[in-house]
Amino acid sequence: MRPPILNPLFSEVNSLPGIGPKLAPLFDRLLSGAHRPARLVDLLFHLPYSCVDRRSRPKIAEALPDQVVTLEVVATEHRPPATKYGKGPYRVIVEDDTGDVMLVFFMNNPAWIEKALPIGQTRWVSGKLELWDGYLQMVHPDRILDAAGLAKLPPIEAVYGLTDGLYPRVLSKAVDSALQRLPKMTEWLDPAMLAQRQWPGFSQALESIHHPQSPENIDPVSPAVSRLAYDELLASQLALRLVRGRTQRVKGRAIQANGEMSQKILQALPYQLTEAQRIAVAEIHRDLSRPERMLRLLQGDVGSGKTIVALLAMVAVVESGHQAVLMAPTEILARQHFARLGPLAEVAGISMTMLTGRDKGVERVGKLKALARGTAQIIIGTHALFQDSVNFADLALVVVDEQHRFGVHQRLALSEKGEAVDILVMTATPIPRTLALTFFGDMEVSNLREKPAGRQPILTRAMPLERLDEVVSSLRRALDGGARIYWVCPLVSESETLDVAAAEYRFAALQGRFGKIVALVHGKMPPRAKDEAMAAFQRGDARILVATTVIEVGVDVPEATIMVIEHAERFGLAQLHQLRGRVGRGSGQSTCLLLYKAPLGETATARLDILRQSEDGFRIAEEDLKLRGEGELLGTRQSGTPGFRLARLDVHADLLQMARDDAALCLTRDPELASPRGQSLRNLLYIFEREEALRLLRAG
């Protein structure tokens, strides 16, 4: 149960004065992604990204163009539009004893302007001053105030991200009301650290940021923002420690494998394991052989061979008489794993089955019985494995592919389906060290930094979309040479519907040029149609596969040697790297063409430059963190992994190690968080919605 003192923070924004049925949906859209009503905590954590400094109050003769100023003036002349229908701008001449300024209003409301700026009356106007045709002017002043209004004008005005229809003053007023409802909570940070860092209290920090007294107050490294960022990092690290503590408290079981099955698989492989793969296999086997439960992250670049490492881990478990599960984020990937690993399992005499949401009727019942009896030894599946009807005879290992698509609670839910289950999670998105500490701080880490022998570097080129016809013409020559080609369509927006529309348009255009050898795959197609399109491409019946980012992760067609990414500037760096990794998986030369719409912005230019310079996913991940921040990098905005609202790892990385050490010390001294500070830290976990960890604490 959430402590009652925190209830005001989690009340809905529509409980604030002035926010009725029309405004509430706008706050929901801005603050919660419409999946639940916006709450006061969402509003308070919606920090300003900039501010307007209204402290400059010069005389007109001293005012500088292109700056925000607040001028004390008297209106001397109104000039309504001269045109018959009043379509031109409405102008007002204002002056002080040193000069004059023209105020310009478009889409004007004459009655309002006349009332706001009566002739001969003193008013204060605030806005950006400009020089136009030799005269000073201010277009649409931000504020027109009398003496009473000036007294209330904040010298520094916070600027927030908004959504269509929600105005700055409405949001600011709501924030003010929310600040008044902040509960009085006991401090959860160490007083000595607060004094040393000169950090304010939690409530004072929020007050300082939302009502800045200088632009420095909202700087990411300011004491107030740093304090809140540290709170969030500490909540995250406490939660990870509690999860890890739960995993360690539940004893594992020592898996003893004789290696016979693994040896058969290694002999059947057409290649030797890399040194990195051998080290990772040894680390995993060492973990499995211990009586403590394994929780290990296996991260490797695209094409580094994580799947075979995972198979050898699962085989070791089967050799000991237990079952293992490999959980994939999509059905396409699950089917591909099954197709690739099935023959190797067969070589070793292992029974492998696949369970997805598509299984129905007698077939599904038969698979569930095989799982429950233990005759299915390795199970590959999707989210369908979470269902209550899925039971295992003796589940000992869970392998989670593309960990960032699943939350901590999901991997724990699957591990509950067995006794003392070991967990291996994999990601093909190499994770910078700061992110690994943050999101996977409860795990040991194995890295695969080598690519299998014989792989050639991928030739990466960037070209403007104006040369699209030239690119399409060159595909004919590549097809004549036997090439298979991916064509990935743009991320049009956050709407999958629009992405699909873009893919269908490009599919129609390319099919009109090349005929039936062009196939289409996107996330909204029926599963069977997706499978058929992928199978046609894998067989070579289809030679061009037009796709959305549904092919980003794991799809493996070694014969594909060309990747065209349309509107590459709309993709993140790590995502571009993942897509590029769909080619270059055979021994032939592969090419990646990045088609972009000119002119490119600074970030997009940097992104494409890095991609051309490097194929090292670990370096690319570090650069992507600098360019985009941790939330987008791991896809956390769309997944169960907790992205940060306030902390920025590119700015606050130094606070992360402090938070780790602080969390470790707190839980060493007070493992149940029962002391006065422990109770305050429980409040912190609730505020940042890491209470899942407290449920684990109660469950023991």
Image (tube, rainbow, N blue to C red):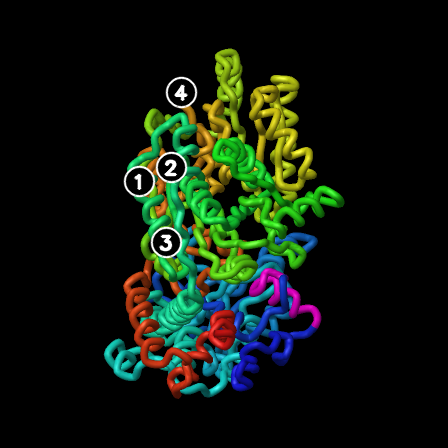
- Amino acid type of the residue tagged 3 in the rendering: Ser
In this figure, which residue is indicated by the disc labeled 2?
A: 304
Give the x, y percent position of residue 536: 61, 25
Q: Helix or strand or loop: what does disc 4 sit on?
A: loop
Give the x, y percent position of residue 182: 50, 83
In this figure, which residue is indicated by the disc labeled 3?
A: 289
- 9, above or below 420, in the image: below
- Amino acid type of the residue tagged 1 in the rendering: Ala
Give the x, y percent position of residue 93: 50, 65
Q: Nearer the viewer, residue 688 or 45?
A: 688
- Amino acid type of the residue tagged 2 in the rendering: Ser
- Amino acid type of the residue tagged 4 in the rendering: Gly
In this figure, which residue is indicated by the disc labeled 1?
A: 276
* Residue at the (62%, 80%) spot, across then down: 17
The residues tagged by marks 3 and 4 sit, at their Cα atoms, a distance apart of 40 Å
Q: Earlier in the sequence, mark 3 or mark 4?
A: 3
Local packing at callout 2 (Cα closer than 10 Å; few below 14, some 14-19, many 20+) is: many
Q: Earlier in the sequence, mark 1 or mark 4?
A: 1
Local packing at callout 3 (Cα closer than 10 Å; few below 14, some 14-19, many 20+) is: some
Q: Is residue 25 magenta?
A: yes
Q: Is residue 402 magenta?
A: no
In this figure, which residue is indicated by the disc labeled 4?
A: 588
Are dots 3 and 4 in contact, CB under 8 Å?
A: no
In this picture, residue 275 sits left or right of residue 608: left
Q: Nearer the viewer, residue 342 or 475?
A: 342
Are dots 2 and 1 in contact, CB under 8 Å?
A: yes
Q: Earlier in the sequence, mark 1 or mark 3?
A: 1
**Mark 4 against mark 2, which lies toward the viewer?**
2
